[in-house]
Structure formats: structure tokens, C-alpha cells
Amino acid sequence: MLSLISTIKTSRTKFSYLKKLIAQKRRCIVFVENTEQCKETNLMSYHSKEKNSEKNLDDFQNNRINKLVTINQLRQGTTFHDLQACIILHSYASNNRTSQKIGRCLNYVEGEKAIIDIICLKGTRDEMWTRQALIDFDNNKIKYIDVEI
């Protein structure tokens, strides 16, 4: 089971699609699984091993940079204004973890649409975990999209 989880988290297919999504967004925050993935995105990052984390976070919060990548979580109380996009590379069956990411990221302007992309592999446990994580969300506001890489 642990090797399956590791394989899903580090899937090159998911990461390839992540890079395409990042390129399409004007302003977004990206949640990945590890520091290697942070580096591969070529974005400013916020995580414990990044020496400029606090500066990068401040730059993002103050609109000096438009894209920021982080590993799983942000510190409590972190909110962003003027942010309509969030990309999550991996969700867990725990809807609390997914809800926390979504809630921290999006303080969007009323009347605007917020887009949250959660990348999952169809027909795998990844898809099952994602559906479980979203169980408390309004199904009418969730759209599943099949993509070709």
C-alpha cells in the first residue's frame, strides 16, 4: 500500500499535467508533495527547506509574484486576496486536509468564480481518494475533466 501511495504522489503523468495547468494560470498557488517537485516547477516556493520562504510568501501575498508553490500546508491564518486559482497535485482521503488547502487559498471576490484543480489519476486509488476528500462539497460545483497528456 505504501509503495502505491508513493507511486501516485510522484506520478510523472500528474506532474506533466501540473506544469501545463501552471502555465495557463495568471495567479495561483500550487500544492505539491516534496521539495524536488517544488524545484521542478521553477516557481518561487514556500517550505521549511527554502531559505527565502517568508520573503516568497510575502511577495505572493502582496502581488509581487503571481505564482507560489508549497508542500502540502501553509501556516495557519495564511489567506490570500485576489486569488481565483489553486492547484493541488495530490489529495488524500481525508477531506479535512483537502478542505484546509481549499479554504486557505481562496478568498475570492464575491461574484467571481474560483477554480481549484485537483489532479488525480482516473481509475486508481487516487481517484477514489479525491472523491472521498470532496464528499462534503457541493457536487453541483464540482466538474471532473478527462485530459490527454
Image: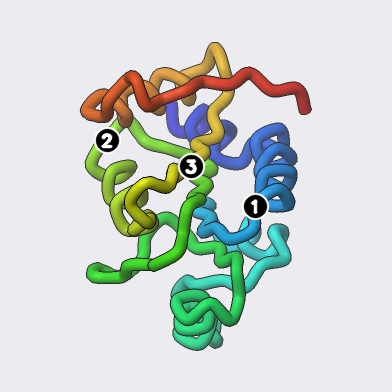
Closest to the observer, 2 or 105: 105
- The residue to which callout 3 is attached is 115
**Front of the two marks 3 and 2:** 3
Residue type at tag 1 = Lys
Q: Is residue 121 above or below residue 54?
A: above
Q: Are marks 2 and 1 in contact (CB under 8 Å)?
A: no
Please tell me how many numbered marks the rendered image carries. Answer: 3
Q: In this orientation, does residue 32 appear?
A: yes
Secondary structure of the residue carrying tag 2 is: loop
User: Cα distance, mark 2 to mark 1?
Assistant: 27 Å
Q: In this orientation, does residue 49 appear?
A: no
Q: Is residue 89 above or below residue 35?
A: above
Q: Find residue 94 and name its label.
A: 2
What residue do we see at 57% from left, 71% from top? 45
Secondary structure of the residue carrying tag 1 is: loop
x and y, in percent, of residue 71 in the image = 47, 60
Q: Find residue 84 and name its label.
A: none
N-terminal of the two: label 1 or label 3? 1
What residue do we see at 55% from left, 63% from top? 69
- The residue to which callout 1 is attached is 25
N-terminal of the two: label 3 or label 2? 2
x and y, in percent, of residue 118 in the image = 50, 36
x and y, in percent, of residue 130 in the image = 40, 27
Asked if residue 17 lies left or right of residue 141, the reply is right
User: Cα distance, mark 3 to mark 2?
Assistant: 20 Å
Q: Quadrant of the N terminus?
A: top left
Residue type at tag 2 = Ser
Residue type at tag 3 = Ile
